[in-house]
Image (cartoon, rainbow, N blue to C red):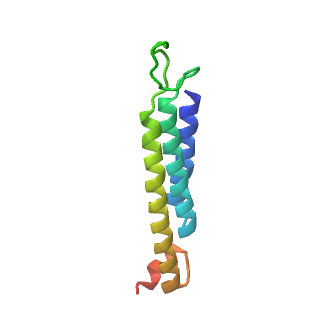
Amino acid sequence: MTLYFLCLMLFCVGLYGVLRKRNIVKMIVGLGIMEYAMNLFFVLLGYRFHGRAPIDAKDQDILNMVDPLPQALVLTSIVIGLAVTALIISIALRIYEKYGTFDITKIRKLKG
């Protein structure tokens, strides 16, 4: 239960970075932290203490196996998160080329 609470706290740190920071780069870092918190949460959902690999053999009982589905979903999430992060960084670079700043409050004032 403590691990789930720590995942929630890590997610809240990332959410704070997205909502309260005015620098686009800091917002991207906060979004990455939120993504990592969700990935960690999904891995923890499939984890079993003293679990074993989900390999079905005739001489082994199907007891206390680790669930492989959350791990596969997290691998897919990592690839999608990398693509989204690359897209956001490229948009941030274009904004910097046009306005010369990463500060959102200054960009809103320019409106051009």
Q: 4 above or below 37?
A: above
Give residue 37's position: percent from left, percent from top: 53, 45
Q: Is residue 70 depicted above or below 88 in this figure? A: above
Furthest residue to the front? 58
Q: How many marks?
A: 0
Image coords of residue 100 (percent x, y):
55, 84
Please report the residue visible at 53 percent of the width from the left and 69 percent of the height from the top.
Answer: 24
Quadrant containing the C terminus is bottom left
Closer to us: 84 or 12: 84
Image location (x, y in percent) of residue 41: 50, 38
Residue at x-position 55% and y-position 75%: 102
Q: Decide: is 105 above or below 82.
A: below
Q: Which residue is nearer to you in this view: 58 or 89? A: 58
Quadrant of the image containing the N terminus: top right
**112 relative to 42, above or below:** below
Which residue appears at 52% of the width and 33% of the height? 44
x and y, in percent, of residue 6 in the image: 58, 37
The residue shown at (56%, 67%) is 25
- Which residue is nearer to you in this view: 50 or 4? 50
